[in-house]
Image (spheres, helix red, strand yellow):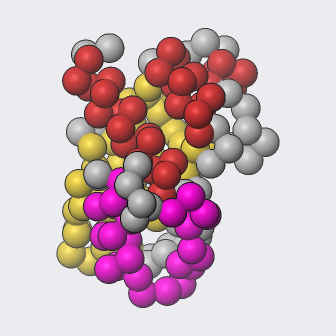
Amino acid sequence: MGNNVSVVHLPNYAGKSCDTALVDELTLAGIEVTDIGIKIPGEVPTSICGTIRHWSFKRYWTYWVCNGPGIPIVEAMKLHEAHGEYVRVDGDCTGPSPLEQFGGFGTGHYHVDTLVGLKALADTIKQVYEDGV
């Protein structure tokens, strides 16, 4: 990943107007930015979200919640081994692997705490689609 991307945890945007910052985070991670046109109330009131194919990326307090049809277990394990500390399977802060959490099935739900992790997840999703895994 380039020098413009931080390895530190994402800032706390709870209750703040931060659309420009969210666009920057998604863009740096290589995720398509979507502005739905109205602010959705929640931890981070924003109209900005991200998409990669059937995956959605929504910003919460200090992390992105990422949902999609799933990543096959082999690729999910590679992602976990490299980035499991801040790309959290099923949002679990205790850090279980996809194998531990889902018994051999891949996962379609992550909480991501850093830009490095967001880029790694985005790259993994894109690679899965490209490879037709």
Q: Which residues are magenta?
A: 6-29
Quarter of the image for residue 49 reads bottom left
Q: Position of residue 61 (x, y in %)?
A: 58, 70
Above-or-below relation of 52 to 33? above
- Quick one: quadrant of the C terminus? top left
Above-or-below relation of 133 to 76? above
Q: Is residue 10 visible?
A: yes
Q: Is residue 16 magenta?
A: yes
Quarter of the image for residue 114 reads bottom right
* Number of callouts: 0
Q: Nearer the viewer, residue 97 or 8?
A: 8
Q: Is residue 56 magenta?
A: no
Q: Position of residue 50 (x, y in %)?
A: 31, 56
Q: Residue at x 44, y 41 (%)?
A: 120
Q: Residue at x 51, y 48 (%)?
A: 117
Q: Residue at x 62, y 43 (%)?
A: 88
Q: Residue at x 29, y 33 (%)?
A: 126
Residue at the limit of the structure toward the right, as seen here:
94
Tell whether 131 sits left or right of 16.
Answer: left
Q: Position of residue 41 (x, y in %)?
A: 44, 76
Q: Position of residue 8 (x, y in %)?
A: 60, 63
Tell whether 83 sits left or right of 71.
Answer: right
Tell whether 110 sits left or right of 20.
Answer: right
